[in-house]
C-alpha cells in the first residue's frame, strides 16, 4: 500500500511541475457513469492492481491512461 501512496505523490508532483492540476479520486469498479461525474477533468490515470488495469477506454468520455503514459507526458527529459 505504501508503494501506491509513493506513486500517487510522484504523479502529483510530476503534474504540478508540468503546470497541470491533479486530483486523486478513489472509486470501486471503474465504469462510465462514475467518471462522467467529473466533466472538468481532461483525462484519468488508472492506478490499480494488475488484474484490473486492462480496460477499454473507448467506452469513457475522457481518455483513461496508464501511469507510464502519464510519466511520458509529464517528463520533459524524454
Image (cartoon, rainbow, N blue to C red):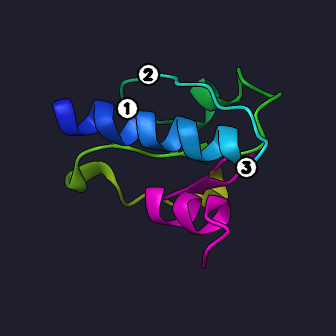
Between circles 3 and 1, the one closer to the viewer is 3
According to the image, label 1 marks what residue? Answer: 29
Give residue 63's quadrant in the image: bottom right
In the image, is 30 to the left or to the right of 38? left
Mark 3 / mark 1, whichever is N-terminal? 3
Between circles 2 and 3, the one closer to the viewer is 3
Residue 16 percent across, percent down from the top left: 67, 37
In the image, is 75 to the left or to the right of 36? left
Residue 25 percent across, percent down from the top left: 52, 23
Q: Name the residue at the left extreme.
A: 1
Label 2 with label 3: CB-CB less than 8 Å:
no
Q: Name the residue at the right extreme.
A: 40
Mark 2 / mark 3, whichever is N-terminal? 3
Per the image, label 2 sits on a secondary structure element best described as: loop
Residue 18 sits above or below residue 6 on the image: below
According to the image, label 3 marks what residue? Answer: 18
The magenta region covers 60-78
x 66%, y 64%: residue: 73
Per the image, label 1 sits on a secondary structure element best described as: loop
- Cα distance between the residues tagged 2 and 3: 23 Å
x 44%, y 42%: residue: 10
Label 3, residues with CA under 10 Å away: few <14, some 14-19, many ≥20: few
x 57%, y 58%: residue: 70
x 58%, y 47%: residue: 14
Between circles 2 and 1, the one closer to the viewer is 2
Residue 64 percent across, percent down from the top left: 59, 52
Residue 49 percent across, percent down from the top left: 23, 46
Residue 7 sits above or below residue 72 on the image: above
- Cα distance between the residues tagged 3 and 1: 29 Å
Amino acid at each position: 500500500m505504501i508503494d501506491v501512496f509513493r506513486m500517487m505523490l510522484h504523479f502529483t508532483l510530476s503534474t504540478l511541475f508540468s503546470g497541470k492540476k491533479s486530483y486523486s479520486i478513489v472509486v470501486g469498479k471503474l465504469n462510465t457513469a462514475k467518471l462522467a461525474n467529473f466533466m472538468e477533468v481532461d483525462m484519468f490515470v488508472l492506478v490499480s492492481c494488475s488484474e484490473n488495469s486492462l480496460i477499454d477506454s473507448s467506452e469513457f468520455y475522457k481518455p483513461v491512461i496508464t501511469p507510464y503514459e502519464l510519466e511520458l507526458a509529464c517528463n520533459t527529459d524524454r
